[in-house]
């Protein structure tokens, strides 16, 4: 595992090599844990390995129709796999994944599937003909299995329908955003940032982590080098402005969260590319043309984002599990060896004290859970003013839209009324959804801050927890003079770790390497995440990426489902003045909002979100502590039975345990530097 100590992954292949090395180490630790009857530790290792084995990085390519999304994907893949056309082409979600056997699996909205030849893809997923468009309307997603280097190392590319093509296609794209690891937002250099793109970015994509979005400005080769650079620079400035404006609205300009966010946000990833030229260059194997397309830079940034940034999370979870599991294995071996050297009476005294210590830990944990519940109640109580004003603020937004909507006397004519009515209704719907989105993001931010503060407070409990484990370990300490002449397992552990340049003082644990972070998902740099709480929400509360958190989605779904826009406007108003028309429209809108408020308990939805988030925190602590406590108690119970039967450790058993201890000590030493580096990376983002 020498590579992992220096964080040697800058590409997908080297990243996967590091994952493989860490997974192999975990496999060895699982075997050791089962041989020592540490079944809870072994099962937790197996669970982590299973999740990692099936993990794919999903990258969605997003943007308005005819921005060159499919062409950019084909350039990434190095060949023309996805259909592209001068007209809006993509009508479904198309996922490209690696396989040596090329074919397409079409998943229909009714749950059925169909395997088709790859050269028939356009018949199922495009709008290029009446027949294909009708077929595409029945398709949920098409997965293209293809042997392409870009997807070889568990990377899936998702082609999405063009935004603003029609509402249904936009909704299809929105459905995938919570499930992806990164997004590439494709912008045309010919018309950068339409109003729709600006609104979509502000209200749909800039609600989570800017670091996981790449903005690709597709130049199409129509500008001079100087103009291209100027366009990219302008796009970058606009995005930075949008991001900061959105953060101010969500966090509050004077909040400490915004101050941290402003300091750490960095520059958006904006890169100018020639997707078509890159595709032609790869097809013709023309290196010079490929460099001219600037595509290698784009690919490099994408790889870095998926490996160093997103991949660091995966590697840190694996490294943390190695450290926590390895520490528990060594702890068990040390207690095992030392306990068998004790006199039976001395052991029984220590055994009883150790069992009492374990129960005391559990009592303290229950007390902490009460405090976590209180913290959840405090968060909800602080949110109450926002909840009380929610519907009033949404209705206020609708009223403002009606007041400001430009109308002339001509608009009140019967032949124009329907168009005015539809436009005004759509304008109200868009504005109230955006207002609801912002309010819900503010609510979610307050929940995240509460979770972060509780995580900071819980660090004292984590310290107490591991101090208690240390006391249990120390209870079974045997003076060197009482050990065998050749030394014991404890000596070999210390020697192996110090000898490999690892951590000294490993006698009773491996705390320095970050074991105590395991109680909150192994995130020792957690306190630095007060700005976005990305890892905390992802690890504990299960939050999604690039979309509003769960409560926002619930609220917007409620609005979309109940705000029909079917207002009762009396016909006689056609000949009345505009002011009377708008007042009547307001009354109808207000009536529907009143019905929505009655039928939708928004406050209860928020309360459930708060409870769910803090319950996730408790579940994480409960799971991680019980893995350690149950296996520690099992070790003590097995030793108690052994002592009662007056058994002694055989020479072969001593050799076996010493070999395990030496191997595990080396694993821990090799993993420590990686863990520390990953923690620094995650803390700095």
Image (spheres, grey):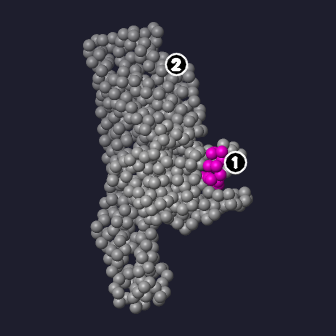
State which tag comes first along the sequence, 2 or 1. 1
Residue at point 52%, 41% (across, down): 151
- Spot occupied by residue 15 in the image (x, y as percentages of width and height): 54, 36
Q: Which mark is residue 585?
A: none
Instruction: State the residue position of label 2.
Output: 495
Q: Is residue 598 above or below residue 406?
A: above
- Spot occupied by residue 652 in the image (x, y as percentages of width and height): 39, 10
Q: Is residue 12 left or right of residue 405?
A: right
State which region is magenta. Answer: 265-284
Please tell me which residue lies in front, 78 or 554.
78
- Spot occupied by residue 263 in the image (x, y as percentages of width and height): 58, 53
Residue at point 52%, 40% (across, down): 147
Q: Element at badge 2? A: helix
| Viewport quadrant of the N terminus | top right
Residue at point 62%, 57% (across, down): 218
Q: Is residue 540 left or right of residue 225?
A: left
Q: Is residue 286 visible?
A: yes
Q: Is residue 281 magenta?
A: yes
Q: Is residue 378 above or below residue 319?
A: below
Q: Is residue 14 left or right of residue 613?
A: right
Q: Residues within 10 Å of mark 2 (few under 14, many from 20)?
A: some
Instruction: State the residue position of label 1.
Output: 289
Q: CA distance from mark 2 to mark 1?
A: 57 Å
Please tell me how many numbered marks the rendered image carries.
2
Q: Is residue 62 magenta?
A: no
Q: Is residue 318 left or right of residue 640?
A: right
Please tell me which residue lies in front, 299 or 319.
299
């Amino acid at each position: 595992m020498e590579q992992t100590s220096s964080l040697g992954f800058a590409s997908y292949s080297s990243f996967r090599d590091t994952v493989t090395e860490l997974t192999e180490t975990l496999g060895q630790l699982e075997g050791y844990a089962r041989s020592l009857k540490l079944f809870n530790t072994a099962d937790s290792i197996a669970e982590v390995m299973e999740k990692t084995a099936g993990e794919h990085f999903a990258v969605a390519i997003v943007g308005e129709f005819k921005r060159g999304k499919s062409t950019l994907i084909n350039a990434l893949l190095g060949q023309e796999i996805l259909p592209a056309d001068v007209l809006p082409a993509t009508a479904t979600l198309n996922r490209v994944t690696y396989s040596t056997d090329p074919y397409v699996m079409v998943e229909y909205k009714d749950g059925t599937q169909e395997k088709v030849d790859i050269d028939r893809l356009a018949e199922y997923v495009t709008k290029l003909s009446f027949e294909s468009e009708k077929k595409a309307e029945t398709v949920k997603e098409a997965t293209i299995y293809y042997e392409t280097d870009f997807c070889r190392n568990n990377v899936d590319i998702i082609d999405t329908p063009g935004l603003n093509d029609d509402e249904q296609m936009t909704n299809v794209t929105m459905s995938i955003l919570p499930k992806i690891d990164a997004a590439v937002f494709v912008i045309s250099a010919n018309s950068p940032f339409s109003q729709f793109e600006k609104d979509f970015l502000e209200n749909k994509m800039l609600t989570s982590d800017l670091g996981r979005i790449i903005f690709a400005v597709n130049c199409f080769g129509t500008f001079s080098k100087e103009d291209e650079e100027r366009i990219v620079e302008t796009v970058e400035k606009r995005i930075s402005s949008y991001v900061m404006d959105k953060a101010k609205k969500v966090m509050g300009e004077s909040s400490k969260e915004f101050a941290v966010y402003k300091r750490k946000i960095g520059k958006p990833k904006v890169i100018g590319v020639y997707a078509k030229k890159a595709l032609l260059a790869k097809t013709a194997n023309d290196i010079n043309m490929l460099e001219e397309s600037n595509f290698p830079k784009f690919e490099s940034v994408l790889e870095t984002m998926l490996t160093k940034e997103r991949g660091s999370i995966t590697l840190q979870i694996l490294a943390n599990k190695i450290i926590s599991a390895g520490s528990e294995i060594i702890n068990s071996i040390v207690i095992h060896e030392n306990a068998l050297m004790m006199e039976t009476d001395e052991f029984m005294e220590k055994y009883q004290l150790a069992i009492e210590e374990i129960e005391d830990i559990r009592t303290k944990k229950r007390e902490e859970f009460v405090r976590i519940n209180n913290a959840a109640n405090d968060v909800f109580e602080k949110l109450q003013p926002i909840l009380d004003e929610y519907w009033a603020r949404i209705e206020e937004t609708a009223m403002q839209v009606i007041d400001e909507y430009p109308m002339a006397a001509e608009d009140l004519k019967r032949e124009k009324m329907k168009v005015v009515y539809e436009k005004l209704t759509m304008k109200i719907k868009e504005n109230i959804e955006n207002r609801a989105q912002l309010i819900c993001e503010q609510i979610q931010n307050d929940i995240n801050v509460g979770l972060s503060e509780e995580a900071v407070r819980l660090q004292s409990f984590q310290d107490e927890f591991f101090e208690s484990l240390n006391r249990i370990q120390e209870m079974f300490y045997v003076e060197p003079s009482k050990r065998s002449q050749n030394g014991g397992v404890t000596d070999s552990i210390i020697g192996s770790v110090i000898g490999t340049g690892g951590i000294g003082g490993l006698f009773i644990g491996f705390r320095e390497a970050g074991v105590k972070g395991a109680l909150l998902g192994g995130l020792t740099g957690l306190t630095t995440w007060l700005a976005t709480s990305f890892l905390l929400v992802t690890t504990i509360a299960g939050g999604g990426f690039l979309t509003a958190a769960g409560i926002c989605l619930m609220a917007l779904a409620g609005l979309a489902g109940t705000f029909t826009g079917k207002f009762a406007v009396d016909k006689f108003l056609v000949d009345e003045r505009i002011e009377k028309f708008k007042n009547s429209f307001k009354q109808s809108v207000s009536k529907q909002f009143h019905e929505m408020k009655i039928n939708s308990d928004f406050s209860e939805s928020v309360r459930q979100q708060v409870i769910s988030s803090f319950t996730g925190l408790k579940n994480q602590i409960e799971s991680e502590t019980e893995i350690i406590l149950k296996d520690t108690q099992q070790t003590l119970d097995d030793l108690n039975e052994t002592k009662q039967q007056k058994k002694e450790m055989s020479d072969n058993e001593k050799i076996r345990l010493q070999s395990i201890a030496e191997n595990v000590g080396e694993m821990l030493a090799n993993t420590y530097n990686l863990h520390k580096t990953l923690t620094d990376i995650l803390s700095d983002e």
